[in-house]
Image (cartoon, rainbow, N blue to C red):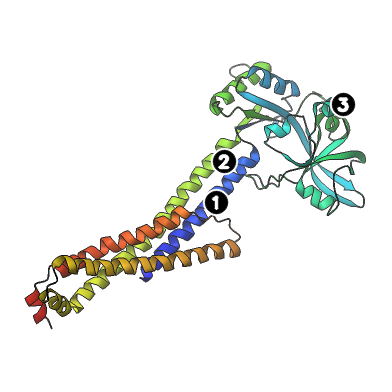
Amino acid sequence: MLGIVIGVAAVIAMVAVGSGAQARVAEQIRSLGSNLIVVRSGSAVARGVRLGQGTGQRITEDDAVAIQREVGAVQVAAPSVRGLEQVVFGVLNWSTVVQGVTAEFLEARDWTLTAGRPIGLEDVEGAAKVALVGHTAVRNLFGDAEPLGQIIRIRNIPFTVIGVLDRKGHSAGGQDQDDTVLIPLSAAKKTVLGASRSSPRAVETISVKIWPSEDMAEAEGQIRELLRQRHRLRPEQQDDFWLRNLADALQAREESSRVMTRLLAAIASVSLLVGGIGIMNIMLVSVTERTREIGLRMALGARGHDILVQFLVEAVTLSLIGGMIGIALGLAATRAISYVAEWPVLVVPQAIALAFVFAAAVGVFFGFYPARKAARLDPIEALRYE
């Protein structure tokens, strides 16, 4: 029975760990925004030195407008800039990511507010000194105070908090997405982060949200073709921008997590197989030890079917009792893993049911041979057995 207990517990615990990893990746996908394509500037070259992604400053607000207007699959395109700044409220201060965004940014990122109002078109056009703050920034700047209506200072410039962003959690790269302050793009360029000297309309990133019914790969190709045309790139020239389908990348990670879950379950199932073989061996020994009892029962009228059922029920009972103990042990192990390792776990009811049914099936499969051997014993030979 010990093999069944360990096998069922291992299956439940391993599937819970794998499912927790899948849920974590799915949460990251949702936090990025569904159907999201990110456009960033390519690499700038200075005296033969390539400076890396985002240094070229070639994508602009006009590119975002063109993408939204000319690519039918695009629901919304939101340009943005960002920088690390010290934000001050009263006697408290906090270094956080300040992002200059447009009114479409929250829609592109599937980001909602827990309080207040979003940045509107009139805020962007008027370079209004208003701000939306994430939960991490709220906690470090305001503590238990109400943030709405408060004045924060970024580079000694006052901004009024008009909204609090809903929690986003950590991104795929481990960055805290809630540690941020959003301000109008125009205000960011004019007063906080500054604009590019070579192109005042330049931005760092364009977040492009695709309609759910549209094909992401096709939309990505259309966006690339449009930007190459707008940037007047010849066929032999490389892109001066960078495109990435973040949802696809994370879904690939989710598929990897799913495969890993199946692998862990398969490895744990070996314990069930070993437990089944153990039950078969014990039942074979039991048949040998109880040969005289079997002969006596058959002499008193028991048929082979009765003996078969008797030993089969014993094997299945052992498996089911082991399965129930294994379920309890597996749930306890899952809680222990979650607490000690601080690893996200997700107990799947289907995994519990499958492990229990598999335990019963092991009892039937490995108990059938000893039961069949007992049922085929000759009563006379069995009674003579010493």
State the mark number for residue 21.
1
Horizontal and vertical percent for residue 286? 23, 75
Q: Which amino acid does label 1 sit on?
A: Ala
Question: Between tags 2 and 3, which lies in front?
Answer: 3
Quarter holding the C terminus is bottom left
Q: Which amino acid does label 3 sit on?
A: Gly
Residue at image location 92% in from the left, 39% down from the top: 158
Q: Which residue lies furthest to the bottom in this view?
A: 386
Horizontal and vertical percent for residue 232? 67, 16
Lateral position of residue 37 relative to residue 320, left or right: right
Label 2 or label 3, whichever comes before in sequence order: 3
Residue at image location 23% in from the left, 69% down from the top: 311
Label 2 or label 1, whichever comes before in sequence order: 1
Horizontal and vertical percent for residue 352? 44, 58
Q: What element carries label 3?
A: loop
Residue at image location 78% in from the left, 35% down from the top: 118
Q: Residue furthest left?
A: 380
Horizontal and vertical percent for residue 126? 87, 26
Instruction: Rate crowding at label 3 as few (under 14), some (14 to 19) or many (20 or more) other CA atoms within 10 Å.
Output: few
Residue corresponding to mark 2: 250
Residue corresponding to mark 3: 126
Residue at image location 28% in from the left, 70% down from the top: 314
Q: Marks 2 and 1, Cα distance to the nearest angstrom?
A: 12 Å
* Residue contact between numbered discs 3 and 1, judged by CB atoms under 8 Å: no
Q: Which amino acid does label 2 sit on?
A: Leu
